[in-house]
Image: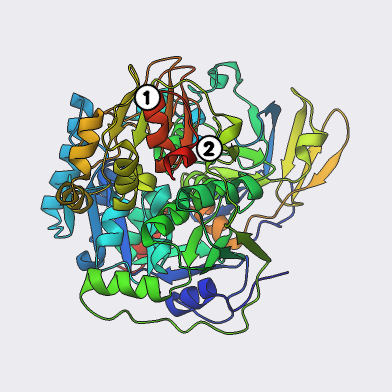
Amino acid sequence: MHSKDTYTHTILLQHCVNPAGLADGEYAEFHLDCILGHDPTIALLIDDFRRLGGTIWDKSRVLFTADHFAPPASEERAGILKKFLDFCKQEHITNLELFTGICHQVLVEHPAAVPGALIIGADSHTVTAGALGCFATGMGSTDVLYGLITGKIWMRVPECFKITLTGKPAPFILGKDIILKLLADLGEDGALYRSLEFVDHTDSGISMDSRFSISNMVVEGGAKAGIFIPDGITARYVEEKNGSPCEQLTVPDAAQYERDIVCDVSGLSPMVAIPPHPSHAVPVTDVAGEPLDQVYIGSCTGGRLEDLKIAATILKGKKTAPFCRLIVIPSSNKIYLRALEAGYVKTLIEAGAAIANPSCGPCGKIDKGIIAAGETCLATSNRNFDGRMGGTGSRVFLCSTATAAASALEGKITDPRKYFN
Amino acid sequence: MPRTKLTVGGDDEATEYGTVMLKKMFTGTAFILGDHVNTDILHPPDYFSLHKERIASGLSRGAEDFILKMKKDDIIVAGRNFGCGSSRESSARSFAYNGIEVIVAESFARIFYRNLTNQGIYLITCRGIQKAIEPGELIRIDLAKNEISSHSRGWRLPCDPLPQYIQNVLEHGGLIKFLEHQMNKNP
């Protein structure tokens, strides 16, 4: 069945350059509310931008971050960062976040991310902002260059899946477990080109931090967007962030979806994704005991305040296993400062964690925790492809922060449930 | 903007449009890849660079250097969800910098599809090709008929027509030239 009159369609229709007759699978051009970019992917478009003699259509709608090579760990990367920063200087980019956090976290802390906004970003995990009711999607440098100059972008109107979350998650269940379970059910291309619309009908509502994790990883199922239909939890978050009431988008009552999925999170087990596919997720008990060289808590998926809090709760007064390195990277400085105030950082350091500054870290094999050939890392990040974090034959398992923290204590993949009594 | 339909008949290899050409026919030997071949395999993240030579040298370095086994007229025939993963455009550019003009797959991951199209590479979605094809088989992609056929074994399979917008981008040789054309038209 084709989808019709969905939340996604409503946003797209409002932004369509020529709004006559939008339907699934059609190509159309859309006005952009915001463009997100970071050091390497923006650096890649600068030469073409200059050669075209381009000007940015609206600088107030551009948010750039230096978060990948932050700070740079090699001469080549220092050169890439310099090129990016010189461009920002020359173009008088005012919304520049220099080493303050990972772009996807910085975006959801920024006033531009509000329900109904249409956002593209030069990074696949731009879908994270869907948790705030934005249509946010990732693209490559050339698409972003097109957007920067014209303020518009072409897109294929996506079919939509409705995913209703119900039940009452156990205290050790985080958004990460929910999305790993959904990815396991959908498969690695089960949501290809689709926009996923999440409706939160769980008993007490899923936290904003967990929603960010869920939206962040929809791309690992091929999806174009992962949007939480805004509710009271969204409104409170946006109001606190922006200091003004959150405008609600009117959603048609009679939306039709290609698929209607109900996911009861009540009996959900902590999930772990086996390399090299994020969708190869199984209950933690299936892989418990797998020896670990490193545990990584961080990234645009799993380095938020909720993550640091749960890690500190599990690790308080304990020590990580001998020879198991624990690396913790808060997703942004705002989170870092709040975790410092709450004492989480002190607890984590005392337990044996190495805390690094907000940035992408070892994910994407960048820096601060790359693993050697043959080593195994358990990570709260989003990708476990071969070589994603290090050398040949190195492996990355993906999990929630609760599972990561429990596993760091034992030096092997560990069911976190025994730390929740 | 003037539009050129792909369904123009005749034996010409391409339809002329301004100074650029829209190709209608590709012939080559199938070079088979599997399902869910991700961007980190196709172009490991440490090959991200601003230098063309460095980007070009990273192609397939995470997958036993399949590029070294490819011959000049080989056509990649991939499985489902080809190019899933990162938006790093260096992955897509590495295909262009190695002279790859066309790729066939059961399906493409969406960002990868955009990135390769923007580089002017023809991406042909053909459901069922994985089952039909054998390694080293000579195939012909006919975009006038939207069909892929085997020279040696005679099978024919329909492929998805290229959407009009994609045709416009390819006619210009990629999105940058398409944008340049628009900027020259509306300075």
Q: Mark 2 vs mark 1: same chain? A: yes
In the rendered structure, the answer to whether residue A191 lies left or right of residue B11 reads left
Image location of residue B181, percent across then percent down = 39, 59
> What amino acid is found at the position of numbered circle 2 in the picture?
Val
Residue at horizontal 49%, vertical 23%?
Answer: B62
Image: A285 above or below B87? above
B117 or A389: nearer the viewer: A389
- For the C terminus of chain B, the quadrant is bottom left
SS class, disc 1:
strand
Q: Is residue A88 left or right of residue B97?
A: left
Q: Give the labeled residue for mark 2.
A: A272
* Residue A103 position in % (x across, y down): 29, 51
Along the line of sight, the residue nearer the viewer: A142 or A94: A94
Please tell me which residue lies in front, A114 or A30: A114
- x 52%, y 46%: residue: A220
Q: Which mark is residue A142?
A: none
Query: Residue B92 location, x and y as percent?
Result: 47, 38
User: Of all residues shown, which one is farthest toward the right?
Assistant: B154
The reply, left or right, for residue A339 in relation to residue A403 is left
**Is residue A414 visible from the viewing direction of this image?**
yes
Mark 2 or 1, nearer chain start: 2
Give the CA distance from mark 2 to mark 1.
Answer: 15 Å
* Residue B114 in the image, given as x and y percentages of width and height: 50, 50
How would you rate the neighbour count of disc 1 (Cα within 10 Å): few for under 14, some for 14-19, many for 20 or more?
Answer: many
Relative horizontal placement of residue A207, taking residue B81 as reference (left or right): left
The crowd level at tag 2 (other Cα within 10 Å; few <14, some 14-19, many 20+) is many
Determine which residue is flagged by label 1: A294
Q: On what subunit does the disc labeled 1 rest?
A: A
Q: Residue at x 62, y 69 (%)?
A: A24
- Labels in figure, total: 2
Per the image, label 2 sits on a secondary structure element best described as strand
Question: Is residue B4 visible to the viewer in this orientation of the structure?
Answer: no
